[in-house]
C-alpha cells in the first residue's frame, strides 16, 4: 500500500522527540519533529484514502477549549480526534484565571488530547495556553492523572502550529516532497480586509517555520503593519542557517514577482494588539471599540492590497500556488472589498479546500507522536490490522 512508504520514514522509539511533549509552538520543535508530523499527516491521509481505519484509542476523550468561535479549527480538531477514536468534548469557553489549574486537571482525567485556542491578547494568550500545559504536566507528575493528554495549541497570539504545519505539508505534497521546497520563493503578504483585527499567529507561524527549510521567503506589508519584533530576528536566523533567504518589502507586486507560492492574509498590527490588551486589562471595553473602528478606517488607505488576476500573472509562469487559512475575505462574495477578487478565489477554491483539509490529519499525527513512544510501530499496527471502514 502507498501509505507504507510514509510509515517507514516515521521515527521509532529511539528517534521520537515529541513523545510526552505538548505542542505549543513550532520553534520549540526540531526540524525532525516537524518532518515527523508532516509524514504522519501523509500516512494518515493515505490510510483514509484507502478506507483503512486509524482508530487506535479504545476509549478516551479529546477536550477542546476555544475562547471564541473558530469553525474551521473546531471542525479540524473534532475530525482529527474522531479519526483516532476519541470522544469529543467541547468546553466552548475560556477558563477563568482562578480555576485554570483545577479545570485543566479535571479535563485531563480520561483525556488523551486537549486543544486550546486563545489568540486575542498579546502575551496573555500564550501565557494562558502555557498555564494549561503546565497544569496538565504537574497533574501527571503528582500522580493526579494516570496519563498526560497531549496539549495542542490551536491558535495563540504567537503561533498557529497546526495551520503552519498543515501548510508546510500541503506545499510538500504540491512540489513533490519536503526536499523540493528548498529554493522556492514564498510570498507572505498583508492583504486588505474590512475586519482588520485578526491575530498575528498565522503569518508569524508561517515565517518562523518556512524559513527553516531553505525557502526564499518574502514578507510584504504596508508601513505600520508590524508583527512581533522577535519574529523578524527568528526568520533571519532560520534563513541563514538553512540556506534560504528572508527579505521584507512594502510592495505586494515585488513579493508576487516570480513567486512559487503566494499567501495573502490580513492581520492587525502588533502595536494595535498591544494597545487592545492594555485596554482590556483596564476594563475599558468602550475604548477597545473605538480603537478597532480607528484601525478599520486607517486600513482603508491600503484597500488596493488585494490579490487580482493581474497580480497572479506576475508569479512564476503565472501559476503560483495560492494559499490561505480559509475562510477568506473575498471581494463581491463575503465583502465589498477583501483580500482577493472573486475571480482569483474561484480559480483557486479547490486547492484552498484541499489545503484546509490537511488540518485534521496534522492534529491526529501530533496526538500519535505525543502519545506513542514508538510511532512507527503504532502506524504499522494500524496498517497490518487494516480494519476497513464500512462506508
Image (cartoon, rainbow, N blue to C red):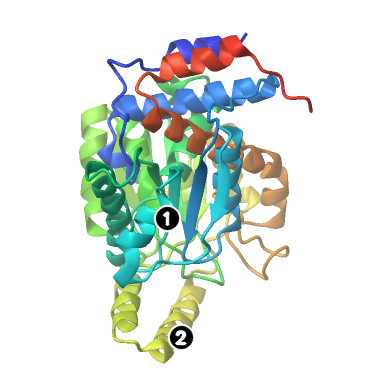
Left or right of 150 in this view: 82: right
Tell me the quadrant of the picture where the C terminus can be found.
Answer: top right
Label number found at residue 284:
none
Q: How many marks?
A: 2
Residue 310 in sight here: yes
How many other residues sit within 10 Å of disc 2, few (<14), some (14-19) or many (≥20)? Answer: few
Dot 2 or dot 1: first in sequence order is 1
The residue that label 1 is drawn on is: 251
Q: Position of residue 73 (x, y in %)?
A: 55, 51
Give the camera-side residue of 222 and 7.
7
> Above or below — where is 219 with respect to 176?
below
Q: Residue at x 54, y 10 (%)?
A: 4
Give the camera-side residue of 259 and 63.
63
Tell me the quadrant of the picture where the N terminus can be found.
Answer: top right
The residue that label 2 is drawn on is: 289
Give the camera-side residue of 49 and 166.
49
Mark in front: 2 vs 1? 2
Q: Position of residue 91 (x, y in %)?
A: 51, 60
Q: Residue at x 67, y 50 (%)?
A: 345
Q: Residue at x 28, y 79 (%)?
A: 278
Q: Position of residue 61 (x, y in %)?
A: 52, 44
How many other residues sit within 10 Å of disc 1, few (<14), some (14-19) or many (≥20)? Answer: some
Amino acid at each position: 500500500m502507498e501509505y507504507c512508504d510514509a510509515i517507514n520514514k516515521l521515527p521509532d522509539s529511539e528517534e521520537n522527540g515529541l513523545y510526552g511533549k505538548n505542542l505549543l509552538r513550532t520553534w520549540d520543535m526540531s526540524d525532525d519533529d516537524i518532518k515527523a508530523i508532516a509524514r504522519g499527516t501523509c500516512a494518515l491521509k493515505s490510510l483514509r484514502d484507502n478506507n483503512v481505519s486509524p482508530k487506535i484509542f479504545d476509549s478516551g476523550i479529546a477536550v477542546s477549549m476555544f475562547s471564541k468561535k473558530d469553525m474551521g479549527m473546531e471542525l479540524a480538531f473534532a475530525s482529527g480526534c474522531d479519526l483516532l477514536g476519541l470522544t469529543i468534548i467541547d468546553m466552548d469557553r475560556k477558563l477563568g484565571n482562578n480555576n485554570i489549574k483545577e479545570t485543566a486537571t479535571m479535563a485531563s482525567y480520561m483525556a488523551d488530547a486537549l486543544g486550546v485556542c486563545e489568540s486575542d491578547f498579546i502575551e496573555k494568550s500564550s501565557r494562558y495556553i502555557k498555564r494549561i500545559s503546565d497544569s496538565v504536566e504537574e497533574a501527571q507528575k503528582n500522580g493526579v492523572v494516570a496519563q498526560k493528554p497531549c496539549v495542542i495549541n490551536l491558535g495563540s497570539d504567537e503561533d498557529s502550529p497546526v495551520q503552519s504545519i498543515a501548510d508546510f505539508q500541503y506545499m510538500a505534497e504540491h512540489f513533490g516532497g519536503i526536499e523540493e521546497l528548498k529554493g522556492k520563493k514564498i510570498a507572505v503578504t498583508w492583504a486588505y480586509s474590512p475586519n482588520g483585527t485578526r491575530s498575528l499567529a498565522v503569518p508569524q507561524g508561517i515565517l518562523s517555520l518556512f524559513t527553516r527549510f531553505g525557502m526564499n521567503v518574502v514578507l510584504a506589508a504596508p508601513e505600520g503593519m508590524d508583527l512581533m519584533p522577535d519574529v523578524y530576528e527568528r526568520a533571519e536566523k532560520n534563513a541563514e542557517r538553512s540556506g534560504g533567504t528572508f527579505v521584507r518589502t512594502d510592495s505586494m507586486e515585488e513579493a508576487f514577482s516570480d513567486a512559487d507560492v503566494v499567501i495573502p492574509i490580513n492581520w492587525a498590527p502588533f502595536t494595535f494588539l498591544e494597545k487592545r490588551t492594555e485596554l482590556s486589562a483596564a476594563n475599558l471595553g468602550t475604548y477597545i471599540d473605538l480603537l478597532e473602528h480607528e484601525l478599520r478606517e486607517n486600513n482603508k488607505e491600503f484597500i488596493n492590497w488585494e490579490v487580482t488576476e493581474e497580480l497572479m500573472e506576475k508569479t512564476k509562469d503565472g501559476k503560483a500556488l495560492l494559499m490561505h487559512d480559509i475562510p477568506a475575505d473575498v471581494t463581491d462574495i463575503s465583502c465589498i472589498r477583501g483580500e482577493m477578487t472573486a475571480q482569483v478565489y474561484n480559480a483557486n477554491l479547490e486547492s484552498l479546500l484541499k489545503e484546509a483539509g490537511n488540518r485534521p490529519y496534522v492534529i491526529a499525527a501530533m496526538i500519535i507522536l505525543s502519545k506513542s513512544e514508538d510511532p512507527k510501530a503504532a502506524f504499522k499496527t494500524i496498517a497490518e490490522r487494516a480494519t476497513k471502514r464500512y462506508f
